Image (tube, helix red, strand yellow):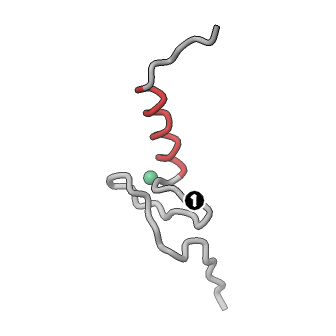
Amino acid sequence: MAKQLKTSADGRRCVFPHCKRLLSIYNHGSYCHVHCDQMTREQMRKAPYRHPL
Ligand SMILES: [Zn+2]
């Protein structure tokens, strides 16, 4: 009587190399929450930060 949660019906996984985290069905991105945040920071780092005047 073990209930199986269908949290990853699609069985999608993070596309980050060597990352095997299953993506939540609520996660519509290609990365898991960890790498999604990491990639966002990478993009922010690449973009020149300008001090708001
Ligand atoms: Zn990941």
In the rendered image, the vertical position of residue 43 relative to residue 51, given as above or below: below
List the single residue furthest toward the front.
Answer: 53
At 55% from the left edge and 59% from the top edge, which residue is drawn? 28
Q: Number of labelled discs?
A: 1
Circle 1: is it few (<14), some (14-19), or many (20+) Cα within 10 Å?
Answer: some
- Check disc 1 and report the residue beneath it: 27
x and y, in percent, of residue 38 in the image:
47, 39
Does 43 sit left or right of 52 as displayed? Answer: left
x and y, in percent, of residue 45 in the image:
44, 26
List the single residue furthest toward the left.
Answer: 17
Quick one: 14 or 44, which is closer to the camera? 44
At 48% from the left edge and 29% from the top edge, which residue is drawn? 44
Label 1, secondary structure: give it: loop
Image quarter hosting the C terminus: top right
At 38% from the left edge and 57% from the top edge, which residue is drawn? 15
Q: Amino acid at mark 1?
A: Asn
